[in-house]
Amino acid sequence: MISGLLRFAGRSRELPVRPEHGEVVAEARGLRVDLGGREVLGGVDTLVRAGEVLALVGPNGAGKSTLLGALAADLDPAGGEVRICGRPATRWSAPELALRRAVLPQAAALAFPFPVAEVVRMGRAPWAGTGHEEEDEAAVAEAMAVTEVTEFADRPFSALSGGERARVALARVLAQRTPLLLLDEPTAALDLRHQELVLRVCRERAAAGVAVVVVLHDLGLAAAHADRVGVLHAGRIAADGPPAEVFDEELLSRVYRQPVEVLAHPRTGVPLVVPRRAAPTTASVDDTAPESGKSGALTST
């Protein structure tokens, strides 16, 4: 942690300016990414605005995490361009990028048993030497409170459950306080309550003017919490728009190679996506069974 603070503190940085609501914070233009000699993204165009939650959905291997990594400028594109806060990502230094985007990877691992509070405090490393250090304690306390990890602030990170680690990792990212928040499957290890909590936090950050991009497998969560959904298929965006417009039965059935039904929630109207299944068979009592068979004969219907 100390070396990380010194690495950021020793460099001159242009500090971020809070974007206006609706302003484009991150953008991909004709983005191509090759990994292992294979094209993973082929000509992707997308953008995310301040005050918006963009959910990236799609089947395994569609390119969701790769697109997130490219938007974070953690992956070098084979073609096209990524822009962050109005400038090509390559024109920001690493310390300047750390002030503009915070990234939550799929897995959080630490080699040393740092206490939870120290792990969250690592999110403040990019701000060392900027004159904003007085905000550190408030940022850390707020991030721990909204992710409900304050009660085990002194416990070693290595002693936590998988879901608890996921929430601590999210708290670290939130403490970074950047205009762009990039989250890769933040709900995968969480129970029902904490899945909702994490997506509510995303909505609250967006309401405060942050641009949020989140990779999700749960289409129900995406429909309930995202302003826009980008459906990825074979390294390209098959559809992009509000969930109510994008979640189409034909499109999703084709992309996921699984027949689905899209139903409106009876109270909220939010789309519900469920696999199309055959009607289950049920057992019934055959009324023509002999009187002596008191339990009746079971037949399948």
Image (spheres, rainbow, N blue to C red):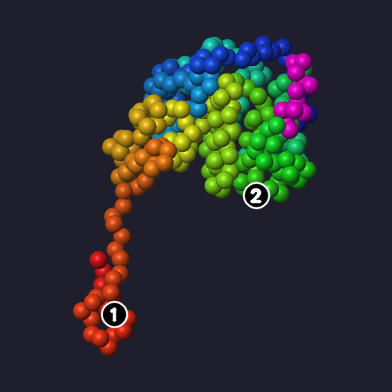
- In this view, the residue in front, 220 or 130, is 220
Q: In which quarter of the image is the C terminus?
A: bottom left
Residue positioned 55% across, 25% down in the render: 206
How packed mark 1 is, by other alpha carbons closer than 10 Å (few <14, some 14-19, many 20 or more), is some
Residue positioned 23% across, 77% down in the render: 287
Q: In this view, does 144 lie above or below 92?
A: below
Identify the disc placed on residue 68. Answer: none
Identify the disc placed on residue 296. Answer: 1
To which quarter of the image does residue 150 belong? top right
Disc 1 element: loop
Q: Is residue 6 magenta?
A: no
Residue positioned 71% across, 34% down in the render: 120
Q: In this view, does 164 lie to the left or right of 116?
A: left
Q: Mark 2 points at which residue?
A: 161
What segment is highlighted magenta in the picture?
130-141
Residue 127 visible within the image? yes
- In this view, the residue in front, 136 or 288, is 288
Disc 2 element: loop
Residue at the bottom extreme? 292
How packed mark 2 is, by other alpha carbons closer than 10 Å (few <14, some 14-19, many 20 or more), is few
Residue positioned 36% across, 40% down in the render: 264
Q: Quadrant of the N terminus?
A: top right
**Rendering coords of residue 240 (x, y %):** 38, 26
**Rendering coords of residue 277 (x, y %):** 31, 52
- Dominant secondary structure of the residues highlighted in magenta in the image: helix
Report the amino acid beneath label 2.
Answer: Ser
**Camera-side mark, 2 or 1:** 1
Q: Going from the N terminus, do you reach mark 2 or mark 1 first?
A: 2
**Rendering coords of residue 215 (x, y %):** 49, 34
Q: Is residue 147 left or right of residue 282?
A: right
**Rendering coords of residue 284 (x, y %):** 28, 71
